Structures are given as structure tokens and as C-alpha cells.
Image: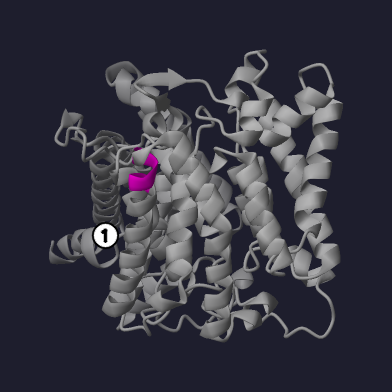
Amino acid sequence: MKDGLKQVFKGIVTENPVFVLALGMCPTLAVTKCAIDGIGMGLSTTAVLILSNVMISALRKVIPDGVRMPAYIVIVASFVTVVEFLLEAYVPSLYASLGVYIPLIVVNCIILGRAEAYASKNNVYLSLCDGIGMGLGFTVALGLIGLFRELVGAGTMFGVSILRSNAAFAPVEIFVKSPGAFLVVAALAALQNKLGLKSATNRKGKPKSGCNGNCLTCSGCPLEVAKGEDKS
Amino acid sequence: MRAFFKSAVESRYKTPENLRVITANYCIALLPVIVAGVYAFGFNAFKVLLAAVVSSVLSEYVYERLMKLPVTTMDGTALLTGLLLGLCLPSEVPLYVPVVGGIFATIVVVHLFGGYGFHIMNPVLVSRCFLLLSFQSAMTQYIVDGMSMATPLSIMRNGGVPNLKEMVLLNPNAGCIGEASVLALLAGALFLLLARKISLVTPLVYLAVFSAFVCLFGDGPVSFNYLLSHLCGGGLVFVAFFFATDRVTSPVGALGKIVYGLLLGTITGIYRIMGTTVEGVSYAVIFCNLLVPLIDKYLAPKGLPEREEAEG
């Protein structure tokens, strides 16, 4: 029980996929135009992540090592299809605004990353907790970035108008357009570097992963960071 | 990080005195442009210019103080950045537009890249594009005496013929403050040329290639008037002489400058004639700015200090 809670906490705070591991940057940049989109994307990913983690963990002794990637992708893709149909049926507005990014959850590196780094090596219960933690961490991060961009770029929060434009102020629309996402995420990374926080984009905070910085032969540094932390 | 974008050009900027002379020359060259702009657009234009200058200079000073860097406000680059930025804006924008633009140009585009001389794109044009994307309605409505006016380029886009004489001498419908008079711009450019602060290679190649592009692919009947309206309308002359010649963000050698002008002319043509917006010179310049390190890598003259690699 305690291990599970620890895993959830890790996913949300100390190993937050967006803020610390810098995983899943594609949806982070693409669907954080407003808080609702970000949270919707985060929750959809959470659902897929929990289901796929559980399934992969349960099948970890059955799936042969040589074909594990195709197997994972088939599992993840099935769950994504389920989620996509559910969204289309019950939350059509979210389905419309997320668009192509829902099917793209299949290739979200958080999901395959957790499958490879965690679910394939741990039992079902821990994998479930890992899925919940990572998923919620992703949701929180996307929601916060979305909230910030929405507030600065459109003057609204969750669609409710907060700041009205007048003679002395107008929302900085660039923040709800694509370049704004890069500005916000870059500023976030700069802030983490400045404060010396542990993150994959922060050189000082990165523990030695034994790969000598050779990314070509590495299955993903942030994951190595996570594994290194587990042992200590 | 700081050294990554360190270019061969930067060595010319080592002495602040030298830099101060350059910026002073630019400011003198801009005087006729400012006078023409303020005369054509009225007191509002002056307010916009002042807001941009004050915001640039203040944000540089405050940033350098806060980050405990040597204060370089006295070299005049922030002042020049603000002045040029103000000239790139329409006169009727709300005053927060030049203020935000000045902060963005000096802090984000210049100082986050390591200070003046290390930036990779022209701060003024990047800031202008930032403002265009941020405050779209304020930036593209040109109002004169309470009436929304069509700029020469939008007249041409709609198939009309703009008043060429007005464009060259003094045009109250020009759009941005600095575009009021082509004659004033040319006078400023001539001064910079005589003071040997700019090279004529890039602007000439730029304008020539752009003219060729317009003749080949233009949507109107090819005539001398049509071509001249394209050259004088919008910010082409301003950008060709004052931004495409900027030493920090343009190639070093003559050959590089020719290639740079070639790229600029073609991309500006694509933006203007095939793009969705009537004007595209600022996008063209910042796009080509990003190619400058590549051009310099192959075409910079021998004997210049090597471009340093990133640390670590």
C-alpha cells in the first residue's frame, strides 16, 4: 500500500513526466491552448496509461523480449482506440478540440516509456499506481501550462473571462498560438535551470546514467534517471 | 550557450566606443525618417516612438542590474533598438504595444541570448512579428484621423493603383511610422553609406532579386509603375537598408552578403505575392537571419576569428 502511494506521489511531484522527466513534450506543446484542453488530454492519457500499464505488467512474463515493442504498441493502440471512441461519443467538444492528438497518444513517449521502464519489470499493483501517478502528473502539468497560456493569451480561465481588454491592456494572443507554447515551456526549463531543480533539461541535476552522454545507444535518459533514483 | 552564437562579426563590437559611434550614426541617419513619420502621422507617432525607446532602454538597464551584469545601456544599442521598433509600428497602436515590444526585443531576443552582439535574429523585427501575432487587430489597422486607411500594399492586393508620388515623398497612409517617406529613408541610407557603416551589397542584391521576382511572378501587369509601387510600398526600402545590413545578424563576406540578399529577395517575393498577408519583409529577414551562421560557415572570408563552439 505504502509503496503504491509512494509511486503515485513520485509520478505527480518528484518525477513529474513534463516538469522533471521532460517526456511527452509533443502534446505538452500542442494541446495546452487552454486549461480544459490540457486537462482533457491529460486525463485521456491517464486512462490509457493505467490500462496499458496494468495489461503490460500482467503480460510481462508472456511477451517474448524480442517482440515486446510491437506487442506494447498493439496494447496501447487498442486502449487509445477505446478512449477515442468514448470521447467521441460522450465529450464531443473535447474530441473536436483535441483532434489528431488523441490517436497520437499511441506514440506518446510517456506511455511507451513507462511500459518499457516500469510496467515490464514490476507487478500489476505497482504498475497501476505508477500509471495513476504518471498520468495525474501529466494532467497537472498540462492543466497548469494550459491555465497560464489561457490567462495570458486570452484573459480567461477555464473559459471564464477574468481579464478584459481595455485601453491599457489586451491579452497577448501569441500565448494561445503555437509559438506561445515554446515560449512558456522554454521559460519553464530556464527557471528550473536557474533554481537548480532536478529535471531532464537541467544538466546539473542529471545523475550519471552510465551512458557517457551517448544518446544514440540509450533507450531514453529520463528513464535512466528514474531507475537510478530507485536504487539509491 | 553564450559562445555558441558568437560570430566572427562580434569581434568588431568588442570596444564599446566603437559600438557607440555606430549607434550614433544610425540615430543620425534615422532623423529624417523620424521627422517624416511624425510629420505624416502627427503627435501619436512621437508618443509611440518615445514609448518604445523608454521601454527598451529601461528594460535593458533593469535586466542588467537584476542579473548583476555590467550595465551596457550607455552604448546606445537599446536606444537604437527602441527607435527602430517604434518606426516599425503603426502610429495609432495603444501604448502598451510599443512597451511590450521594447521589453521583448531587448530582454528576450537580445539579452537571453547573451547580450548585444550575440543575438541570432534582428531584435526589432522579431519583436514586430511577436506584436503582430499578439495584438493582431491593433497592429494591422491603420487609422488616420479616425478613419481606417488602406496601405499601398493592400490597395495593390485589391487590384488598385496606389499614389506613387505620395509614397515616395510623404504618405499619410503608409502604414508604419518609418514607411512614411521613401525619400527620407534613402537620405538616411545615403548617410550611413557615406559614413561607411553599411555595405551596399545586400540591399542592392535584395532589391534586384525582389524586382526580378515581381516581374516573373507578380499578379499585376508588369510595368515600371507596378514594380516601383512594390519597391516603395510597405517596409521594403526600410528593411533593405536598415535591417538587412545589420552587422550582427548578416553574413560577413561579400559573397555571403550576395547569397543573403538573394535569399531575402526570393523569400520576400514569396511572402508578398503568394502569401496570405500583404507584407512579409520582417518574416523574410528573421528567417534569413537563422541561415546566416550557415552562410558564414562556407562563405566568410579567411583570416577572421573562428566561430566558437558551444561550451561543454
Residue A171 location (% of width, % of height): 27, 38
Is B47 covered by the magenta stretch?
A: yes
Q: Residue A1, located in which quarter of the rendered image?
A: bottom left
Residue A17 location (% of width, % of height): 34, 58
Report helix, strand or loop for mark 1.
helix
The residue under label 1 is A11
Q: Is residue B14 left or right of residue A27?
A: right
Say which amino acid is labelled 1: Gly
Q: Residue B62, located in which quarter of the rendered image?
A: bottom left
Query: Does residue B79 appear in this view?
Result: yes
Residue B23 location (% of width, % of height): 54, 69
- State the quadrant of the C terminus of chain A: bottom left
Majority secondary structure in the magenta region: helix
Query: Does residue A82 appear in this view?
Result: no
Q: Is residue B272 above or below residue B307?
A: above
Range of magenta residues:
B44-48
Instruction: In this rendered view, identify the residue nearer to me: A105 or B108.
Output: B108
Residue in view at x 70 percent, y 27 percent: B274
Residue A181 location (% of width, % of height): 40, 48
Q: Is residue B112 above or below residue B306?
A: above
Residue in view at x 36 percent, y 83 percent: B69
Q: Residue A190, located in which quarter of the rendered image?
A: bottom left
Mark 1 Cα shell of 10 Å, populated few (<14), some (14-19), many (≥20): many
Residue in view at x 69 percent, y 80 percent: B307
Is A134 covered by the magenta stretch?
A: no
